[in-house]
Amino acid sequence: MTITELAIKRPTLIVVIFGALIVLGLYSYTQLSYELLPKMNSPFITVTTVYPGASPNEVETSVSKPIEDAISSVDQLKSLRSTSSEGVSFVTAEFDQAVNVDVTLQNTQRKVNEILSSLPEGSETPTVSKFAIDEIPVLRMGITSNMPSREFYQFIKDRIQPRISKVKGVAQISLVGGDEREIKINLDVDKIQTYGLSILQVTNAVKNSNLDFPTGKIKGENEQLIVRVAGKFSSVDELRNLIVARSAQGGEIKLKDVAEVEDGTKEHTNLTRINGTTSVGLLMYKQTDANAVEVSKLVRNEITMMENDYKDANLKFDIAQDGSMFTIDAANAVKFDLGLAVILVAIVMLLFLHSIRNSFIVLLAIPASMISTFIAMYMFGFTLNLMTLLALSLVVGILVDDSIVVLENIYHHMEKGEDKRTASLKGRNEIGFAALAITLVDVVVFLPLALTGGLIGNIIRQFALVVVISTLLSLFVSFTVTPLLASRIGKLGELTNKTIIGKFAIWFENGFRKLTEHYLGLLKWSLNNRWKVLAGTVALFFASLALVPAGFIGSEFIAQSDRGEFAVTIELPSGTTLERTNFVTQKVENIISSLPEVKKVFVNVGASNEGLIGQSTSNSSELNVTLVDKELRDKSTDQVGHLIKKKIMEIPDVTVRVNPIGIFGTANATPIQIIVKGPNREDVQKASLTVMDVLKKIAGTTDVRLSSDDAKPETRVEIDREKLASFGLSIAEVGATLRIALTGDDDSKYRDGDNEYDIRISLDQFDRSKISDLSRLTFMNPRGQLVELQQFANIFETAGPTKLERKDRISSIVVFSQVNGRPSGSIGQDFQAAMIKEKLPKGVELVYDGDLKNQADSFGSLGLAMLAGILFVYMIMVALYDSYVYPFVVLFSIPVAMVGALFALALTMNALSIFTMLGIIMLIGLVAKNAILLVDRTTYNQREGMETNDAILEAGKSRIRPIFMTTLTMVFGMLPIALSSSAGSEWKSGLAWGLVGGLTSSMFLTLVLVPVIFTFMEGLKDKIPGLYRKVFNRKIKIISGLEFQEGN
C-alpha cells in the first residue's frame, strides 16, 4: 500500500499526524526569537595591550612584534594584523572558519603568557578576547540628571550600572564621558628642586604610605584573630600632611609643601552629549548567546523602573540607537510580505481553479508545510531572522507546486468520468514521478548552499535548510493531504454565466484557450524551424551575459540599506586638544540637528571607532545620527548624509566622513579596503600614496584616505648613555620619572567608604606645557645628587607617526574608500584595471579586504554551489529517469532563466550581490520543474505510441496550464518582496527581481526551447543508432507512490 492509498483509505491517521505537526509547529514558533541575521561564527582573536606614554614606534617594537611572534604559531591561523598607536597595541588574529574559537582563545592566551616577562616595564598585562561581528552595542544611550556631575557619575557606577548588568543577557556596560572622581597630586617642579627631592622619591613615598598589610594571625585557646595593618589614607588632609622626606636639618617635608593635593575629577578623554545635552554615555553589549531583541526589551523595562525609582533626581535615559528596532522592523516587513504573498497566490489559484473549494485544497499546503517547518527550526536552534523569514516568504509559491501538479492531474481523471477516490489515487500515482522529481531538484540545489563555508555560509545556511525542509514537507502534503481532500471534497468546477465570478471565469478560460492555441501554433512553427529557435535563444543568452561587462549590472557584496542611521566622523589636525575638538564638534552638532530629517544625535568627542577596535583620540569625534522613520522623510539616508557632509566641509581644518550603518549594524568598515604591504615601510608609504591617487580617480569613490594619518608633532628625548652612566642613573629610572611627570601614576588608590578612587601623581599642568619644562626635570642618583634631564639628554621637537600597522608581520597601510552611486565590486574591477599601468616598488603587494574580499570569497563559494546544484539536478534526474538524455534536455531550461534574471536586474538597477546570486541559484531548481513536466509528459506519450512531434504537442497542450499555474504562483509570491520599500528591502529586492525575471522568461522560452532540444536528442537515434542504444535508449522507470515498477 502506497502512502497515498493509506491517506485515502485511513484519513484519520493523516489528520492526527498533521494535527500533531500543527500543534508542535505553533508551539515551536512561540519559542523562536528574533535576530537580524543568523549567528555568525567569528574566528577572530584580539590582543590588546596598554603601554602608557609610549610612542607608536616603541609600542610596535616592544609590544606588537613580540605578541605577533608569539601567536603566529597558533594552529589554523589565517592572518595577523596589528595596530600600534600612542600608548596601546592591538593585535588581531584571524583563524580558519571551522576553528573552535574557545579552544583557540585558550591557545592564544597561553602563547601570550609565555612572553609576559619580555614585555617592557610599565606596560599592562595584555587582554586576550574574542571578537564577534555581531558583538556591537545593542543600546547606545545618554543619561542625564539634576545631580552634581561628579556625584552623578558615581551614582551611575553604584546604582545604574549594576542594575542593568543584572538584566538577563547583558554582558558588558561601558560608560563614556562624565566626571569621575580622582585625587590629584600636582607636583611643583620648583619646590621639588628647592627641597632637593626627585619625582620618584615623592611618588614612592606616597605609594609606600598607602598600604594595607595582612600580617598574620593571633591564636588563642578558643579563637584566632587576623591581624591587619590599616595603612590606607583615611582623608585627603591626611594625604596632604604625609611626610615624604626630611631635610638635612631634620625638618619634615610634607606632601603639601611640594605639591597641590586636589580632590578633583579625571582629565577628560571623552565627552558625550545627546541632542545637545551633556550626558554620561552608556553602551550596552549583549552576551554572545543572548538575543538582542529580548535583551533590549528587558533593559528598556529596567530603565523605565529606574526612572520611576529616581524621580527626585530627575533621572532620564535617552536612547540614541537601539539595534533591535531595525531587526523587529525588518522581521515585520518580511512577515507582511509573506502574508501578502499568500493572498496573491490564493488569487492566482482561484483564477485558474474557479473554485474556493479547489483553491483551499491547494492552499492548505502552505500552512501545513510552513507551520511544520517551525519544528525543525526550533530543533536546529534557528531564529526568526532576515534569512529564515525570507526563505519562508520565497517558498510560498514553491509549497503549492506539488499540490497544483497533483490536483490538476486528479481533475484530469475526474473529467474522464472517474469517481473522486479513483481519480485521486490514479491522478497522484500517474504524476507522482514528476512531483517527486520537481521537489528533489529543489532540494539538491539548496543542499550545496547549506554546506557552504566562510562568512557566506553563516549567512545563507539557515535560509537553504528552511527551504529544503519546507519543500520536502510540501511533497509529503501533496502525496497525502491533497489526494485525501480531493477524494472527499474535490469537485469539478462548473462554469456559469449567471454570476459575475462565473462570467469572469468563462472569459478567463476562453482567453486561456486562445493562449493555448497560439502557443501550439508557435510550438509547431518552432519544431519546423529548430535552428532558428536555437540561434535566437543563444543570441538572447549571450546578450544577457553581456549586460555585466557592459556596465548595466554592477557587483557588490551586499546592497546598502536605508536604515535611517549613520555615523559622522570628524577629524582635526593631529595634536588638536580635546577642548578645541569639542568646540568644533558643537558646530557640527548644530548643523546636523537643524535638519528636519534628524531625530537623534549622539556625540562622542574624542572617539574614533573606525576599524575593528575603537580608541580615543583628542582630535576626532564621532556623531551617531538617527533619522526619523522612512515614511516621514523625503530624503534617503545617503542623501541626508551627503547633505551633512557638504555643510561640514565648509568648516576650516575639518576632515569629515559619513559612514552608513551596514547589514551587521556597524559603521566601522568602509566597502573598499586595499591593504598595501611590504618589508620596507618607506616603500609601503610610497605605494599607498600611488594607490590612493588611482582610487580617487575611479568613478563612485569618496572619502578616500589612508589608515595612517599625517605625522603628529612629538617631543623626542635622546639620551646620551655615557653621560647617563657617569651620573649613576638608568634608562628605567628616567623612563619611569618621565611617565609619572607627563602621564601620571595612578597605581595608588584612595578609599572612601566602599569605593576606591585613583590617586594620580603627576607634574602640575603649568610645569609640563613647554619643551623647556622637560629639560628642568630632576633625578636623584645613588650619591644623593640631583641631576637635570638636560645634563644627559638632547630634547627636541619632531614629527612621528600616529599609528603603525602590520599585516602578516610586515609593514602595511590600508587605503579606505566609501562608495557613492556605484556598487563596490564595479569600483574594484575598475581599480584593478587602472593599477595594471602602475608600477609598485619591489616587494610591495596589494591585498583586498572589506567588501571586495567578502565578495570575492562569497561569489567563489556561490559559484561552486551553483555548479554543484546543476550537477546534482542532472544526477538526480538520471537516477529517477534511468536515462542520460532526458535530464540533459531539462538542463536547457537554466540558460533561458538567466536571460530574464539578468535583464530584470539591469532594468531595476540591481547589482549582482550575494542575495541576487542566491536568487539565480534558486532558479536552477525552480525552472527545471517546467522542463520536467514537459519531458515527463512527452516520454509518457511516446510510451503510449505517439510520434515524437505529436507527443510534444500533446505535452505542451496538457502541461501549459500547470506550468503557468506553478510559475505564476511563484512570481506573484515574490512580487511583494521585489516591490517592498520597508526595512531591509534593499538587501532582498534584487533576489526577488532576479527570480521574477528568470521565472518569467523561463515560463515562455522553456515551452519552446525544451521541445526543440528534445527533438534534437531524438534525432540522434537515426544518426548514431549504436551509441544511442547503449547510452540513451534506456527503459524509463516510473515511480508509483513510493514503489518502483517497470514501464511498458
Image (cartoon, rainbow, N blue to C red):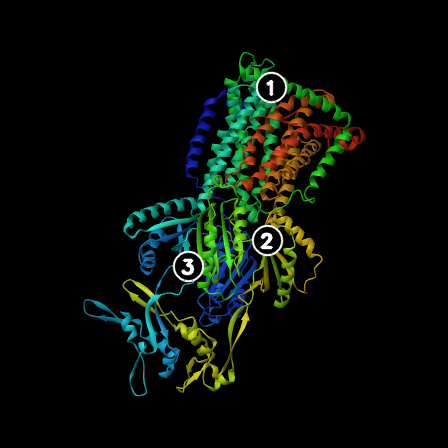
Question: Is residue 638 positioned above or below 530 on the image?
Answer: below
Tag 3 residue: 271
Residue 849's quadrant in the figure? bottom right
- Picture coordinates of residue 481, whole percent (x, y): 51, 25
Which residue corresponds to the image point at 54% horizontal and 47% vertical from the top-left?
A: 638
> For numbered disc 2, what is the local secondary structure?
strand
Q: Are marks 1 and 3 in contact (CB under 8 Å)?
A: no
- Picture coordinates of residue 111, whole percent (x, y): 50, 64
> For numbered disc 3, what is the local secondary structure?
strand
Considering depth in this image, is 378 or 842 the residue closer to the camera? 842
- Picture coordinates of residue 211, whole percent (x, y): 31, 72
> For numbered disc 1, what is the local secondary structure?
helix
Q: CA distance from mark 2 to mark 3?
A: 29 Å
Question: Closer to the N terminus: mark 1 or mark 3?
Answer: 3
Quarter of the picture holding the C terminus: top right
Which residue corresponds to the image point at 47% horizontal and 37% vertical from the top-left?
A: 332
Tag 1 residue: 508
Q: CA distance from mark 1 to mark 2?
A: 54 Å
Considering depth in this image, is 868 or 746 the residue closer to the camera? 746
Question: Closer to the N terminus: mark 1 or mark 2?
Answer: 1
Question: Is residue 707 positioned above or below 141 on the image?
Answer: below
Residue at the left extreme?
Answer: 221
Q: Amino acid at mark 1?
A: Phe
Residue 817's quadrant in the figure? bottom right
Tag 2 residue: 702
- Picture coordinates of residue 597, whole percent (x, y): 48, 45
Quarter of the picture holding the N terminus: top right
Question: Is residue 134 positioned above or below 916 on the image?
Answer: below
Q: CA distance from mark 1 to mark 3?
A: 69 Å
